[in-house]
Image (cartoon, rainbow, N blue to C red):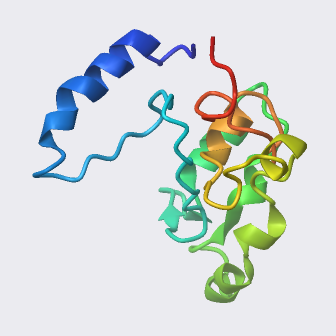
Amino acid sequence: MGKLAMPREVMEEIESSTSGFSDRIQLVRIRFPNEKKLPLASCEAGNIVYVFTRGELTVCPYLVFAARTPQSLHKAEEFIVGNIFKDEDIAAKLDAYNFGSRYKIGGNPTCEGCQINAQCGKGCPAAVIASGKKIEEVDTEVCPMVDHK
């Protein structure tokens, strides 16, 4: 369990108590226990851009934050496209930055051999990085195919 994480039992209780609202609102459960063997959501990195106050443009702020943790095997600069104040060609840099071709999320034997691989989005690569692993590794915290006991 991470420093900011709630115990599994609390997360399961939240899921149970909110499920009655699913017919009226869309529930998006992020980083909840996944005992139903449902595929994980996919990463949105590169689909939405974020600008830090100093002008750095990133494909995902969570990847930058995760890369800045002491245990990270990645550098924050990998996920920063450029600076909107300093780079005249920032639009071209953004167009040229292709997250999907730079990193193969789920590019590991566990995901590649998994029975739900084709449907699975592989979870959050920022969580993988923050846990001290390479971005291609399994998001073990929420992977439905990994034993969480």
Q: Is residue 26 left or right of residue 131?
A: left
Vertical placement of residue 24 versus 57, above or below: above
Vertical placement of residue 10 versus 15, above or below: above
Vertical placement of residue 2 versus 92, above or below: above
Observer able to see residue 73 = yes
Residue 23: % across, % down: 13, 50
Q: Residue at x 85, y 37 (%)?
A: 73
- Quarter of the figure with residue 138: top right
Q: Residue at x 68, y 37 (%)?
A: 139
Give the farthest residue toward the right: 109
Q: Residue at x 19, y 25 (%)?
A: 17
Quadrant containing the N terminus is top right
Q: Nearer the viewer, residue 1 or 118?
A: 118
Q: Nearer the viewer, residue 94 or 135?
A: 135
Residue 143: % across, % down: 63, 35
Q: Residue at x 79, y 25 (%)?
A: 71
- Quarter of the figure with residue 68: top right
Observer able to see residue 68 = no
Q: Nearer the viewer, residue 18 or 129?
A: 18
Give the farthest residue toward the front: 115
Q: Nearer the viewer, residue 44 or 33?
A: 33
Residue 15: % across, % down: 30, 28
Q: Is residue 76 left or right of residue 28?
A: right
Quadrant containing the C terminus is top right
